[in-house]
Amino acid sequence: MPEYKAPLRDIKFVMDEVLDMPGHYASLSAYADVATPDMIDAIIGEGAKFCENVIAPLNRTGDIEGCTRHEDGSVTTPTGFKEAYKQFVEGGWPSMAHDEEVGGQGLPESLGTVMSEMVGTANWSWGMYPGLSHGAMNTISSWGTQEQKDTYLTKLVSGEWTGTMCLTEPHCGSDLGILKTKAEPNADGSYAISGTKIFISAGEHDMADNIVHIVLARLPGAPEGTKGISLFIVPKFNVAEDGSVADRNAVVCGSIEHKMGIHGNSTCVMNFDGAKGFLIGPENKGLNCMFTFMNTARIGTALQGVTSCEGSFQGALAYAKDRLAMRSLTGPKAPEKPADPIIVHPDVRKMLLTQKAFAEAGRALVYMTALQNDIVHKGDSEEDRKAADELLGLLTPIAKAFLTEAGVEATNLGVQVFGGHGFIAEWGMEQLVRDAKISTIYEGTTGIQALDLLGRKVLMTQGQSLKNFTKMIHKFCQAEEGNEELAPFVSQLVELNKEWGDLTMKVGMSAMKNRDEVGSASVDYLMYSGYVTLAYLWAKMAKAAQDALAAGTTEEDFYKAKLTTARFYFTRILPRTKSHAATMLAGADTLMDLDEEHFAF
Amino acid sequence: MPEYKAPLRDMRFLLNDVFDAPKLWAEMPRLAEAVDPETADAILEEAGKIAGNVLAPLNREADEQGSKWSDGEVTSPDGFKEAYQTYADGGWGGLGGNPEFGGMGMPKMLVGQVEEMVQGSNMSFGLAPMLTAGAALALNAHGSQELKDKYLPNMYSGQWAGAMDLTEPHAGTDLGIIRTKAEPQADGSYAVSGTKIFITWGEHDMAENIIHLVLAKLPDAPAGPKGISLFLVPKFLVNEDGSLGERNQFSCGSIEHKMGIKASATCVMNYDGAKGWLVGEVNKGLNAMFTMMNYERVAVGIQGIGAAENSYQNAVLYANDRIQSRAPTGPVAKDKAADPIIVHPDVRRMLLTMRALTEGGRAFSTYASKWLDIAKFSDNEDDVKHAEAMVALLTPVVKSFLTDTALESAVAGQQIFGGHGFIREWGQEQHVRDIRITQIYEGTNGIQSLDLIGRKIAANGGAFFKIYVEEINQFIAAQEGKDNMVEFITPLKAAVANLVDLTEWVMEKAQSNPNEIGASSVEYLQVFGYTSMAYMFALSAIPALEKADAEPFYANKLATARFFTKRLLPRYISLSEAVKGGADCLYELEAEQF
């Protein structure tokens, strides 16, 4: 089992030296006084200890044990999960990045993202229990009445209760417009919710006193399709006047799924049988309400891509230094041993560097996205908030889909570095592949994210939201003109930045003639966008490293490694843009010509 | 519950329309005796039935159940024992075996198709006959007459199974450092002692005896790969009259908990002075293994496409059945709440990627099998030499490229199912877990790529490579004038020119820095693979164009070939550029600086 060590130096590098998060916090009046550098250091240091010592050791055992559903619908989580959660709540972690008026500590959400990264790498399945509360909290804080906030939000913020999002039904996932769960009005103003929801992560468990479900359902007579969906709060236990937990509501877990991975998390079929629920937000506007924080939620899943890369990299690196096989092609490196450690072999290095390059730039991308989210919520001017929202909208599908695909690639490389042992459960590397695979599926599949990026975010704004970002890249390149060491990076980036715009134009033009062209190009377009975005971030990281070296440092190796990894990324990974550029323009005919009856006989 | 239908139509297309196997067989006397088109057809038909009706239905449940170890004994999942019996009774175990010892002497071109069906319907099960066939192959090539007489007939009949024991806890890729010992005994046998791991079906309850081929070192053997010998070590000793005697001194210490192929027992085997007999010459054990390895490695590539085909079939069913959102160009299934997801371009992209990689892979493995057959059955020395060169060159590509593309296919097959793809009941995630091992065993894909560029290309100054390129160039020259082939020939020509250029680049760079080989090898192999697939689709396009109106199959083949050419072939551009990025960027970091 790979041992988890929080990559604090790398985290601080991105926070302080690449993205200037201290400056960012100081510039927001909501955070200027609370999110001081000392405070941040202390929090991250404590968080790292909790992740390394408390939840990382439960990752492998959680996978083996899985969750158990009992006759009465209750679910037991793997050994140690409940106790770890208790410690998490006692440590005040759930409330960290929430407003003080609902019991939070008023720290920035982006700081919560940093903590979530460490939690997620240490034990993704465990992290999903507190993680899923975010959707419920976002819903209630955006759309809830004061009473709903008082009743539910404070308990969710404190972590005493957890939350879920109940969207998917057996017949609908990507297409929520056809969902069937019903909400009938009761005389007392509440609603009776009936229907079946599936794939409800953390839908039932034994870690908290109550579970607050946010359920998508239809009112009687609601319009068909996406415009007839409303949101409801449905607690597992009804809540008494005084806020205490009362009788059991009519919602039970009918079964839990047998899955490829994330075994430690309970993925539930939830049966609502006239369960008491409360409307939240306007009638029939449920999906719109959800969209307001969809980006925020997806940052959390994008993070899973980073954690997959980081966790697998840590495991593979330790093994590559330890495992002996064959001699280096340039002569023995460990002559005293029967063979050299496999890290001497070029292909092993290539696999490790690929993982490392994705993990580090992926972290920078998620943190950068999280900063935009801070500004959307706490920005001091409307202008700032709007600009941040636009950038957040553009970066979110890229971060979510690209980084989770990278996570799948990186975890598979981790298995490959281990050879046959990678396939064996005890080593923990194959679990990372199994856990990572869900990230390209849930919270909108890669295909759905790609349509969101190309269709909604880029083409629907006539390319404006992309232009805002490419302008940022352009400015960076301009500023580094004449910087000789960075020239190989900057010159490539300038070209790609221009090509990105050109490709967008071409795809846009062909999409006007044939609407299938969007879906035909979308995934290649998204992957292309991801590689360019990571190139920008690697160039930025190289710049930060160059500055630090120029200023003089005792950490030369650390900064030189950043420059080396940047070179690796630009030389060996970035060429992938070429084939994505070619295939996104291949045309929809290549996909639509084959009759659907003829795919198989 | 997933189903499996053997892709017989495509197999027949390859054998008859593309590679004209019947003609080839008729030309080689030893094959002409064994097989004709009718026999081949009947074999495919029957194999399809076994795969679809007997093996496929066991696949899902066996994954849940797994093999069980208790006190040295291994119980295979429900139904495996009976299926194994059915398989043996059908004579399938001897399909490619030497007729002198009861085998049927069938060509690999045909055996490979049968393997695809067996592996594609149930990979865990398929490993048992695959390992038996591999052991029989090595024994047939290197064993003494006595050993062959004693063991081969029962291995071909399926009464006994086989296993290959190479890996040890500290030595997998690097077999030169193995520690298992073989002490010569007075009676000419050897006492074998040591621990072997990752022994597929090393112990089970499906056959009455298991014949292990074990790599071990004699007491005075030189260090490294040149001090390894091969031994035959049966689970039960065999009496003079052929009946089973006492249990030999070795046992299965445990079985692994794995990501996939859970139904197959992956065994730790402990040898404690077990009685064994030398196979082949002393200290030539690795060489003896290499004979078998070309076949085994092609078989592993075939495993990949088999399972990917299975995943594809399920994905097509699901994509036609699952309704979700409307087509971008307007509703297609107006009577339903939404359109079947096969209307969406990106779903089609995933399906066609699977389809093209699988069909292209099937063509490529069949093509490689053709060379295996010529090398084995031709009486013309020049042809044999030529074929041996092609086998050597293509084998690592078949193994590696087809398993890499198989994983990509299976992941796409899972993605098409959305959340349901992650749920075990649907069967799609199992293919991903099962296929994942094919990139690792029989030499990891990294090792295969070193074999390709190092041993098969650089070591002979590109001689084998030139033979292959010449063949493709001749094909291009012959087709270039044909209007309807332009769309395939032009991209193929560019891809081949790129491959030649890249090969020269790597060979030149490697002269000054040996690390350039390993730095480029994996991507290089993929460029080789995509280029080869382009050749396969161009070959397939000829009969498909001729018969395009005869049956939708041919028009579909062309659509798939076009998809491949426009949407997958361009990958070589990125891969080649990455290769030319060179080795330096891999070596600037010290090990401690990672």
Image (spheres, rainbow, N blue to C red):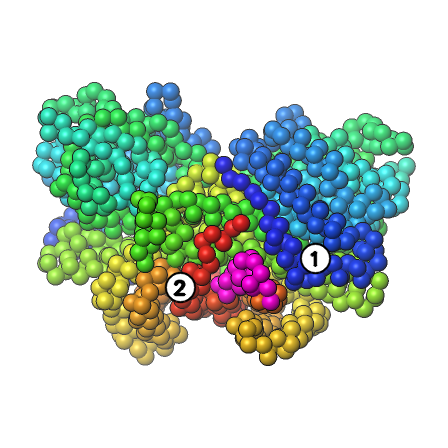
The location of residue A347, given as percent across then percent down, is: 55, 60
Residue for point 25% across, 60% down: A457
Q: Is residue B25 among what the camera can see?
A: yes
Crowding at dot 2, Cα within 10 Å, few <14 / some 14-19 / many 20+, comes out as many
> Taking B385 as reference, is B414 left or right?
left
Residue for point 61% across, 34% down: B255
Q: Tell me where the magenta segment starts and ends, as one range.
A: B546-563
Numbered tag placed on residue A588 in the rendering: 2
Residue nearest the viewer, comparing B155 with B79 = B79
Dominant SS in magenta: helix
Q: Is residue A272 magenta?
A: no
> What residue is shown with label 1?
B369
Residue nearest the viewer, comparing B479 with B309 = B479
The location of residue B55, given as percent across then percent down, is: 62, 37
> Taking B491 as reference, is B470 left or right?
right
Subunit ID for the residue under disc 1: B
Q: Secondary structure at mark 2?
A: loop
